[in-house]
Each structure stands twice: as structure tokens, then as C-alpha cells.
């Protein structure tokens, strides 16, 4: 998604009160490297964007560098060039992308001591999958901006695509999202979550149902996610892209209907993915912003998100 840095944002900050838990992984290591510099930052763009457009993630990269005393910022490029990177947001399966990024980060010596990560839109759930599947190098803090962690059920807009292409993708998702060829060929199908057909979703979703432990319980996923020091989720209150917008806070429709949102702590994934323990250990942070999808100002970004990149224990 293209990041529009022009909206003055009203922000509310939500932080659950929690008690100490002996099972908490209280990592006391500093968010600074041995030389005193801030941990590196990894960015993952959303659908319809690339790593390096100067008006989107290129601007964010520069903003982070300016406010963290020049820390290393790597904006992920999927593939050998910008064209492939753009296409990856629609046509390269997330499992392949996560595997590719895992290898790329392992080869980056600047990340060896750990890094913080910011995911934009679908980049949020891709980075979460990376944390769950690829714990080395270690991700310390994950910030998800508009990520669809329980999937989407609706695609009203397709940024940067023609109207006809958008209509075609929407039709595929509405009528054939769980066909094998659609799951293999269209990224958005891999996190399409039809609450009216939960069994089809669990059995056929080739990405989201797996990382949410909804078909098989992979204990390693929950263990690795709990290695995070902080998991920050930002919801856009006037979002016209993500349906339902509550998915950005890991909430979704109660099974069998598409009206009532089930609170996170009543959802099976709350326990399956390890969020319950993270909640007890004070690792979950929920922020909300007035505005449409990814419409944030530089001022808000610096005030609300940069401190997470600077924190030390």
C-alpha cells in the first residue's frame, strides 16, 4: 500500500494492565548494539508498494535514520529489482517471501545482534510469520501498521491497479479464494478469511491458518513469537481497505457470521499463537489512529513509534 504522509492524526493508546508471570521471557538485553548505536530496523512494505519509493517507504527510511542518529534501516526488496518487488505484493506466495527474507537477513551482518521491525499493511503479518518461523537473527520489537492478523473478508480497493484488475481480484476472492490455484497465485487469497465457511478457511488457507495455528498447533510458532520484547499493533479507525478493521488488532468476526467481532481474549488464536502469554508479560501494545489505511503524519510516527525503536531495558 502507498503510505500517505499527510493526515494529522488523533491517537489513542491502549495498554492492557497485566501481572507478572514466571514464564515471561524478560529479555534484559539492551536495544543498542555494543557500540551504543540503536538497533537496526527492518521495513516490509504492503500491497501495491515497493521497498524504496521516495514518497512511501523511502521517506519512512529517511525519517527513522534522522530520529535514531543514523541507525541502519533495511527496507526489504523481494526479488532482484523494483518490478519484481512490486509484483511480489500480489503474486509471490507469502511462504516463499518469508523464506527468501529469512535467508537475506541471516546473511546481513549488521542484523546479527538483533533488529526491530515495522510492517506496513500485509507486511505486518509477513513480518510476524518471520518472527515465528525465523528467530535468527532475533527480532526484538515488531510494529504492525494496519496488518491483517486474522485476515480480511472484503477487498473494496486495490491501490495502484486498474479498476478491471481490481474487480477481477475481488471476484476471485469472493468465489474461489480457497481453490488451490488461487491460493498459489494470489497473495491476498492466502489471508482471505471467510467467517461463513470456517472449515474451508482452516483447511485451504495456505498461509494465515498456518501461522495462526488454526489447523495444527505448532508450539514453535508461539515460543518464537514470545521471544519478542514488544508486539505493537496499530489500527486505522476509518480504514476502507481492511475489512474488518479489527483484524489489525488481531480480532475478527465470530464464526458463522460477518457482523459481530469477537474480542481477542475470546478468540482461539489468543492462546494458540501465544498472545495470552504475551498479554500477561506486558508485551502487547494496541494503538489506534483516526484516518484511512496507512494515512499517518510524520509527526505521529516520530511521537508514537520512534520511541519503541529507541527503548532500552
Image (cartoon, rainbow, N blue to C red):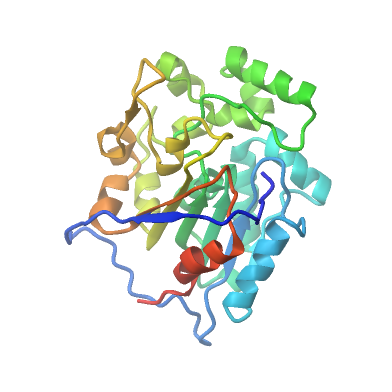
Q: Is residue 1 left or right of residue 146?
A: right
The relative height of residue 173 versus residue 283 in the rendered view (above or below) is: above
Q: Tag count in the figure?
A: 0
The relative height of residue 229 versus residue 157 in the rendered view (above or below) is: below
The relative height of residue 119 versus residue 265 in the rendered view (above or below) is: below
Estimate the x, y position of residue 206 in percent, counting from the top left.
54, 28
Farthest bottom residue in view: 35
- The residue lying at 58 percent from left, 34 percent from top is 241
Q: Quadrant of the C terminus?
A: bottom left
Nearest the eye: 31 or 207 = 31
- The residue lying at 50 percent from left, 60 percent from top is 136
Estimate the x, y position of residue 30 in percent, counting from the top left.
41, 77
Estimate the x, y position of residue 176 in percent, counting from the top left.
61, 14
Estimate the x, y position of residue 273 in percent, counting from the top left.
35, 42
Residue 76 appears in the rendering:
yes
- The residue lying at 62 percent from left, 26 percent from top is 156
Q: Quadrant of the N terminus?
A: top right
- The residue lying at 63 percent from left, 79 percent from top is 70
Q: Is residue 234 left or right of residue 95?
A: left
Quadrant of the image occupied by residue 258:
top left
Nearest the eye: 63 or 195 = 63
Residue 108 appears in the rendering:
no
Amino acid at each position: 500500500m502507498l503510505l500517505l504522509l499527510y493526515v494529522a492524526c488523533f491517537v489513542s493508546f491502549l495498554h492492557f494492565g497485566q501481572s507478572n508471570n514466571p514464564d515471561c521471557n524478560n529479555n534484559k538485553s539492551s536495544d543498542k548494539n555494543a557500540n551504543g548505536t540503536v538497533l537496526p530496523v527492518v521495513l516490509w512494505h504492503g500491497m501495491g508498494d515497493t521497498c524504496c519509493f521516495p514518497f512511501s517507504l523511502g521517506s519512512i527510511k529517511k525519517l527513522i535514520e534522522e530520529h535514531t542518529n543514523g541507525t541502519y534501516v533495511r527496507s526489504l526488496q523481494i526479488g532482484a529489482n523494483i518490478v519484481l518487488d512490486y509484483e511480489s505484493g500480489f503474486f509471490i506466495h507469502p511462504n516463499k517471501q518469508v523464506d527468501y527474507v529469512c535467508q537475506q537477513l541471516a546473511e546481513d551482518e549488521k542484523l546479527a545482534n538483533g533488529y526491530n521491525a515495522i510492517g506496513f499493511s500485509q507486511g505486518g503479518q509477513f513480518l510476524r510469520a518471520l518472527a515465528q518461523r525465523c528467530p535468527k537473527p532475533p527480532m526484538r520489537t515488531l510494529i504492525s501498521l494496519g496488518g491483517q492478523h486474522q485476515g480480511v473478508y472484503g477487498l473494496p480497493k486495490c491501490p495502484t491497479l486498474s479498476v478491471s484488475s481490481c474487480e477481477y481480484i475481488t471476484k476471485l476472492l469472493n468465489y474461489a479464494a480457497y481453490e488451490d490455484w488461487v491460493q498459489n497465485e494470489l497473495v491476498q487469497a492466502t489471508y482471505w478469511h471467510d467467517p461463513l465457511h470456517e472449515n474451508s478457511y482452516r483447511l485451504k488457507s495456505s498461509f494465515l491458518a498456518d501461522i495462526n495455528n488454526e489447523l495444527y498447533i505448532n508450539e514453535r510458532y508461539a515460543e518464537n513469537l514470545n521471544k519478542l520484547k514488544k508486539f505493537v499493533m496499530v489500527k486505522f479507525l476509518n480504514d476502507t481497505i481492511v475489512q474488518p478493521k479489527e483484524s489489525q488488532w488481531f480480532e475478527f468476526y465470530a464464526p458463522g457470521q460477518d457482523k459481530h467481532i469477537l474480542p481477542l481474549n475470546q478468540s482461539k488464536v489468543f492462546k494458540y499463537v501465544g498472545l495470552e502469554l504475551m498479554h500477561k508479560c506486558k508485551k502487547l501494545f494496541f494503538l489506534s489512529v483516526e484516518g484511512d489505511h496507512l494515512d499517518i503524519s510524520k509527526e505521529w510516527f516520530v511521537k508514537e513509534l520512534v520511541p519503541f525503536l529507541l527503548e532500552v531495558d
